[in-house]
């Protein structure tokens, strides 16, 4: 029984060590910084803009970025 307990403790410690080394650092939150809304909009894959004709809303234009270089 002592050997079985030691073996279970060893494997439990190995699993705990792997969890602490690989999982816990990914759970820490990075500091939140204010982001410029214009810079954030440039990273979107699409853009929706209203279309006006004769000072009235006529519809919407949708632009989709396929390639960016």
Image (tube, helix red, strand yellow):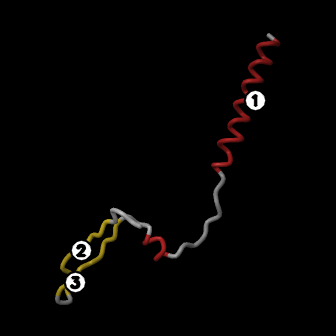
Q: Of marks 2 and 3, which one's residue comes earlier in the chain?
A: 3
Q: CA distance from mark 3 to mark 1?
A: 66 Å
The answer to which image quadrant residue 19 occupies is top right
Dot 3: what SS?
Answer: strand
Q: Of marks 3 and 1, which one's residue comes earlier in the chain?
A: 1
User: Residue beneath label 3, please?
Assistant: 52
Name the residue at 65% across, 64% down: 31
Q: Residue furthest top?
A: 1
Q: Is residue 62 above or below residue 16?
A: below
Tell me residue 48's x, y (percent).
Answer: 31, 72
Tell me residue 69's x, y (percent).
Answer: 41, 67
Dot 1: what SS?
Answer: helix
The answer to which image quadrant residue 10 occupies is top right
User: Residue beneath label 1, please?
Assistant: 13
Name the residue at 44% across, 67% down: 43
User: Residue beneath label 2, please?
Assistant: 60
Dot 2: what SS?
Answer: strand
Tell me residue 14's x, y (percent).
Answer: 73, 29
Q: CA distance from mark 2 to mark 3?
A: 8 Å
Please say if the residues under marks 2 and 3 sit with CB atoms less than 8 Å apart: no
Q: Around disc 1, counting alpha carbons within 10 Å, would you say few (fewer than 14), some (14 to 19), or many (20 or more)?
A: few
């Amino acid at each position: 029984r002592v050997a079985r307990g030691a073996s279970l403790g060893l494997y439990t410690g190995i699993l705990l060590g792997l969890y602490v080394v690989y999982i816990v650092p990914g759970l820490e939150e990075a500091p939140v910084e204010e982001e410029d809304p214009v810079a954030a909009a440039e990273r979107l894959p699409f853009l929706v803009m209203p279309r006006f004709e004769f000072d009235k809303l006529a519809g919407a234009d949708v632009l989709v970025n396929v390639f960016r270089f």
